[in-house]
Structures are given as C-alpha cells and as structure tokens.
C-alpha cells in the first residue's frame, strides 16, 4: 500500500510539473496594443494598459507557477504598423496573447496575424462586429461592445421610447459605416425610419457645415456614428450652433464616460448612449473602480478598461484550468468557463468569440440631477447579451458554419 501511495504521489507531482512545463518559454506574455497618442488615447491608451497590469497583479502575477508579463505598444491607428508590431511580438518577443486593439481596421489586421501565428487575441476596444462574424478567429474573443450591440441598444430602445425619425452624422471609415448600417436595420425593424446621413472625415476640427445641413432635416433623433474626439467636437458644436430643436434628441452610438470631462454636463446632458459598464452601478463596480483609480493614478474607468480587465482575468483563469497556454486549448477553455468578475455574472462566450454580457441604454444626467463626483449616467433600460448582440447564426462566422456541418 505504501508503494502504491508513493507511485500515486509521484504521478501527481509529475502531472503538476507537466502542466507547468506547458507554459511556452516559461512565461506568459500579454501584449497590449492600442492608440496611446492620438484620437482614441484618452479612452484606452495607457489607462487600458493599467487595467491589464492590474488584472495580472490581482491574479497573483503568476499562472501555472510561471510569471506573467505585460508589454505595450502604440499602433498609431495604422493597420500596417499594428501588423508589424504583433508579428515582431509573435516571432521575436514570444508574446502569447495580443490584447485591446483600439480601432476596427487595426483589429482586423491584428486578427489576421493572430490567425496566422496561432496567438490568443483579447479584443476589448475595437467595435466592428465583423470580428465575430465573417472575420472570426478560433483563438479570439471580443469584449466590451461591438457595432451591432451599440446600434441595437440605442436604435431599438430609442425608437421604443418614441424617437421614430432619424438622421445620421457618420464617420467615413469602416467603424462608422458599420454603426450606421446596423442601426438602420434596427430602426426600420422597430418601426422607425432613416431620413438620410452625412459622411464626415476623421479628425475634423469643424463640423459646422455638416450640422447646418443636418439641422434642415425634420428628424426626432440626430445620431452620431462617430468616435473619440470627433464625437466630443460634434456634441460641443451641436450645442454651440443650437442644431437641435424642441423635442429633438441627440444619440451617440459610441460614447465614453471620459468624454464628459472635456464636454461638461451642460453640453452633454440628455445624450442617449449604449454602454456595457458604469462605475457607479452597484457596490462591486464602485469598489473595483476605487481600487482601479488608486492603481491608475486617479483615472476613471470606462467600459474598455472594465472589458480588458475582465478579458485578461478570464484568459489567465483559462490557462490555469487548461494546464497550458497553447492558444487553441486556452480558447476552448475560455468558452467552456463562464465569465465571472466584478460586473459579469455567469456570462457565456460563444464559439464565434462573442462575450454575451449585458448592454444598457443610458442617458447623461443634467447638472441638477448629478449629486456627486462623476455621477453622470442614469440607466434607462438593459438588455441581456442574447438580445443585445447579433445571433451566432446571423454572423457569418466560418467557424460556426464549419461546426454545424
């Protein structure tokens, strides 16, 4: 019996050693790549790098007995630059997972490298729904939001509240086009109609001519299918030029809580938006935010930081459960395990990589309604993930089609 016990103990120790040995290069490296100096830096950038580092620290700094490292890089909003960085990470620096992305065109380029190099891709700040649709990848997961859910929540819920006639100001690149396309479908499906749209260039300082053109339309909802500094400038100039008449509403299909600082509540008040995370939603989100602000030098987290923290945490849990950092094995385990953290509760990750967390329709409070620091939003309605995000069968993901045959 003693011999059997020793053999069993030896086998257990051997199995534990084997699991630890399956961490490639004896370290798990996560490369956070995003915009750190331009249009979207204020919304992601170094604040999102801090979220990834905090997730690693909270996990204990090791997985399967091996250290976890976080690298970061600025892709300058250029897909070719992003591809070059992640290729070097894969080939030279032996990075195991690419994370964040910021920008749909950039993310699609990184997705192709992740596919080619068999790397994990944790997408937290790129919005195009194509990442879990026609461009889906076995080792990628998409967190925080996507263009489908942003459009669905704002369009469907606002039409339900009585906003029937829409006019779009749309960013003239892939992200903006996808937002308008998806929103139009939900507006018409809910019984509303789209009167027209104007395409605007990225990083334009002056939208006055576009706003004057829009103001001539008899819309009930003016929708901004834009992002970053463009959204801030459009909201400011909408107020300056008094482009909204009585009973007309302004809706942004992508808006971050960090936008309110440069805008001020007076300019932003009444804005309708979709969101997946609000720091002041409950005790857990408030407690996490307090720790995050201490970790990040006082930065207020938005849904991108919450999403990246959740993604990194779940990725590390999956490595621990799988006993390896091999991307395909980890991807299977990530989908097998439910996502549970400070704001996701028993959330499913589908085979196409879509994380099915809740989405909310929110409205920016008036200055009179705001009672304390950063008290910016009121929640008007919420949608469970299965209602907010596109169905897997409609996405056109080749992985899903292959598995169904």
Image (cartoon, rainbow, N blue to C red):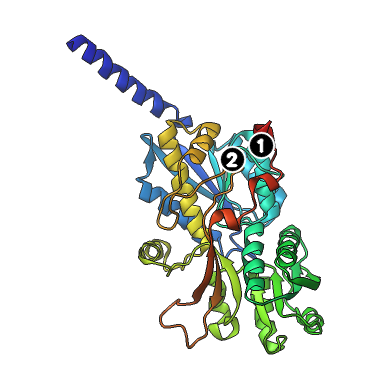
Q: Name the residue under label 1.
A: 399
Label 1 and label 2: CA atoms lie apart by: 8 Å
Mark 2 Cα-neighbour bin, 10 Å: few <14, some 14–19, many ≥20: many
Compared across the picture, whether 299 is left or right of 144 comes to left
Q: Is mark 2 on a helix, strand or loop?
A: loop
N-term mark: 1 or 2:
2
Q: Residue 126 carries which label?
A: none
Q: x, y percentage for residue 239?
A: 66, 86
**Total marks placed:** 2
Q: Nearer the viewer, residue 200 or 83?
A: 200
> Residues at badges 1 and 2 in contact (C-beta under 8 Å)?
yes
Q: In this view, does 8 lie above or below 57?
A: above
- The residue at the point 56 percent across, 86 percent down is 266
- Taking the image as drawn, is residue 82 in sight? no
Q: In which quarter of the image is residue 43?
A: bottom right
Judge from the rendering whether residue 207 lies leftward or rightward of residue 88; answer left or right. right
- Viewer-side residue, 111 vs 197: 197
**Position of residue 188 in the picture relative to residue 9 (left or right):** right
Q: Which of 360 and 287 is in front in this view?
A: 360
Q: Position of residue 166 (x, y in %)?
A: 74, 74
Look at the picture and state if 278 lies above or below 236: above
Per the rendering, the mark at residue 351 is: 2
């Amino acid at each position: 019996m003693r011999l059997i016990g020793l053999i069993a103990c030896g086998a257990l120790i051997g199995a534990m050693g084997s699991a630890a040995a399956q961490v490639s290069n004896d370290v798990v490296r996560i490369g956070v790549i995003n915009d750190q100096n331009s249009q979207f830096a204020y919304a992601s950038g170094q604040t999102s790098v801090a979220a990834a580092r905090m997730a690693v620290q909270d996990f204990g700094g090791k997985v399967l007995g091996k250290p976890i490292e976080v690298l970061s890089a600025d892709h300058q909003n250029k897909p070719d630059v992003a591809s070059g960085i992640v290729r070097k990470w894969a080939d030279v620096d032996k990075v195991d997972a690419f994370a964040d992305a910021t920008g749909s065109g950039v993310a699609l380029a990184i997705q192709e490298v992740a596919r080619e190099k068999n790397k994990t891709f944790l997408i937290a700040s790129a919005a195009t729904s194509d990442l879990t649709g026609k461009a889906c990848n076995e080792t990628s997961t998409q967190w925080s939001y996507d263009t489908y859910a942003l459009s669905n929540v704002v369009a469907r819920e606002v039409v339900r509240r009585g906003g029937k006639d829409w006019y779009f100001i749309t960013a003239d690149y892939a992200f903006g086009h996808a937002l308008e396309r998806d929103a139009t479908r939900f507006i018409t499906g809910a019984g509303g109609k789209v009167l027209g749209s104007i395409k605007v260039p990225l990083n334009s300082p002056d939208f006055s001519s576009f706003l004057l053109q829009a103001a001539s339309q008899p819309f009930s909802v003016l929708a901004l299918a834009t992002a970053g500094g463009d959204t801030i400038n459009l909201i400011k100039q909408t107020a300056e030029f008094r482009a909204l008449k009585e009973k007309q509403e302004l809706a942004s299909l992508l808006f971050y809580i960090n936008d309110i600082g440069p805008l001020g509540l007076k300019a932003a008040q009444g804005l309708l938006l979709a969101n997946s995370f609000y720091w002041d939603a409950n005790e857990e989100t408030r407690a996490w935010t307090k720790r995050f602000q201490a970790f990040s030098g006082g930065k207020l987290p938005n849904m991108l930081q919450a999403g990246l923290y959740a993604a990194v945490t779940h990725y590390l849990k999956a490595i621990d459960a799988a006993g390896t950092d091999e991307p395909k094995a980890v991807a299977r385990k990530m989908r097998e395990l439910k996502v549970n953290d400070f704001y996701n509760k028993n959330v499913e990750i589908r085979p196409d990589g879509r994380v099915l967390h809740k989405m909310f329709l929110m409205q920016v409070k008036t200055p009179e309604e705001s009672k304390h620091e950063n008290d910016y939003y009121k929640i008007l309605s919420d949608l469970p993930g299965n209602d907010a995000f596109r169905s897997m069968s409609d996405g056109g993901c080749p992985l899903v089609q292959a598995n169904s045959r």
